[in-house]
């Protein structure tokens, strides 16, 4: 949905860009679980929203069930690169 033509038009709208304050991916571990080529391949392309939002709009990825391997995939998928990370790891094994 986030990369559909409707969303593409919305993200390019100046008024929408002005009011957009944060992009949130809840249950972000699903990007790993569901983002394969067959089910929801667009999950692995969420980083394509970044050029529409600019650098001032933060991307927030929330999950309570994320192993380190999934965390690394999320970090790469969302193109966090050198951005700051705040998190609490209380374990999920």
Image (cartoon, rainbow, N blue to C red):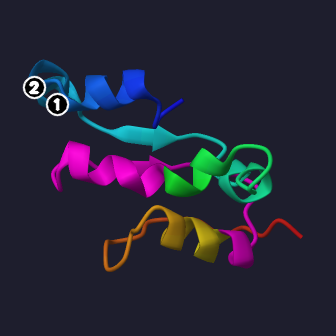
Give the alpha-carbon distance from disc 2 to disc 1, as whole Å: 5 Å
Q: Which residue is mark 1?
A: 17
Q: Which residue is mark 2?
A: 14
Residue 80 — which label?
none
> Which one is nearer the viewer's eye here, 50 or 6?
6
Find out whether residue 26 is within the magenta segment. no
Find out whether residue 68 is within the magenta segment. yes
Pointer 1 local density, CA inside 10 Å: few below 14, some 14–19, many at least 20: some
The residue tagged with tag 2: helix, strand or loop? helix
Q: Is residue 39 left or right of residue 24?
A: right
The residue tagged with tag 1: helix, strand or loop? helix
Pointer 2 local density, CA inside 10 Å: few below 14, some 14–19, many at least 20: few
**What is the x, y in percent for residue 2?**
47, 34
Q: Is residue 43 left or right of residue 75?
A: right
Q: Are marks 2 and 1 in contact (CB under 8 Å)?
A: yes
The quarter of the rendered structure image containing the C terminus is: bottom right
Instruction: Identify the residue at image location x=41%, y=70%.
Output: 85
Vertical relation: 3 (above or below) 5: below
Q: What range of the chain is rendered magenta?
A: 46-70
Instruction: Identify the residue at image location x=72%, y=67%.
Output: 90
């Amino acid at each position: 949905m986030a990369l559909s033509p409707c969303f593409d038009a919305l993200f390019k709208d100046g008024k929408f860009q002005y009011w957009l304050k944060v992009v949130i991916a809840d249950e972000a571990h699903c990007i790993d679980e569901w983002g394969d080529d067959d089910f929801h391949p667009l999950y692995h392309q969420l980083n394509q929203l970044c050029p529409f939002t600019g650098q001032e709009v933060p991307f927030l990825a929330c999950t309570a069930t994320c192993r380190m391997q999934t965390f690394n995939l999320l970090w790469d998928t969302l193109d966090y690169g050198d951005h700051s990370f705040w998190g609490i790891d209380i374990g999920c094994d």
